[in-house]
């Protein structure tokens, strides 16, 4: 089964805020990330899916996915893995950097508190073991 190397996982300021403000949003982000690691690209058209499926092979292309919660139409996130597979960012569509690099909002690394919340949520939904193998890089792991 195909999988994607995530590199360092980052959440945008908007995603971080919504995980703290809205009950269930963190679980939605986690389920979306789990889908992403299984190469389920969410709500992309056939062309986008085909591009991502080619990009996970031996290429140097960025991988992008879009997810929308069925019960909360305003809950939309994008997950983007850079071409060199060094970083994967979870962000809100309105945070996607459309401006120059100098004007881009800062992306924050996952904090220990967020990591523990994600771990607890994954364990509660019975999916912790399924994401442990793909959510690690350079000795850092969700399963520590």
Image: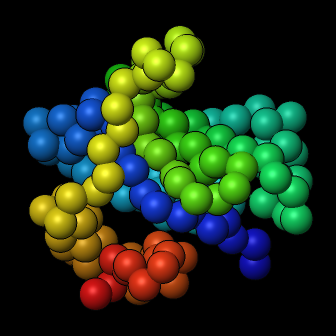
Position of residue 51 measured from the top left corner of the image (x, y, whole percent): 85, 43
- Residue at figure coordinates x 24%, y 66% from the top left: 115
The relative height of residue 61 versus residue 57 in the rendered view (above or below) is: above
Residue 29 position (above or below residue 131):
above
Q: Is residue 6 visible?
A: yes
- Left or right of 119 on screen, residue 60: right
Return the x and y of residue 84 as percentages of the image width and height. Answer: 69, 56
**Who is closer to the viewer here, 138 or 61?**
138
Q: If the image is split into quadrants, where does the C terminus sit? A: bottom left
Q: Quadrant of the N terminus?
A: bottom right
Residue 116: percent from left, percent from top:
18, 70
Say whether residue 53 is left or right of residue 35.
Answer: right
How did the renderer colour the structure?
Answer: rainbow
- Image x and y of residue 35, in percent: 55, 59
Q: Quadrant of residue 74?
A: top left
Residue 114: quarter of image: bottom left
Picture residue at 42% right of the left edge, 84% below the top: 139
Count of marks, rendered view: 0
From what the image shows, is residue 17 above or below residue 6?
Answer: above
Q: Residue at x 44, y 44 (%)?
A: 90
User: Is residue 53 visible in this depiction of the protein?
Assistant: no
Q: Nearer the viewer, residue 10 or 126?
A: 10
The residue most toward the top is 99
């Amino acid at each position: 089964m195909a999988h994607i190397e995530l590199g360092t996982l980052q959440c945008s300021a908007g995603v971080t805020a919504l995980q703290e403000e809205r009950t269930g949003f963190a679980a939605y982000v986690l389920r979306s990330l789990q889908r992403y690691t299984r190469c389920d690209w969410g709500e992309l058209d056939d062309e986008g899916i085909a591009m991502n499926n080619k990009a996970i092979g031996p290429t140097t292309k960025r991988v992008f996915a879009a997810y929308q919660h069925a019960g909360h139409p305003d809950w939309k996130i994008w997950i983007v893995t850079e071409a060199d597979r060094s970083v994967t960012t979870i962000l809100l569509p309105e945070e996607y950097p459309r401006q120059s690099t100098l004007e881009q909002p800062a992306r924050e690394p996952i904090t220990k508190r967020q990591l523990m919340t994600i771990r607890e949520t994954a364990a509660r939904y019975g999916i912790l073991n399924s994401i442990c193998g793909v959510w690690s890089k350079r000795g850092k792991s969700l399963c520590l």
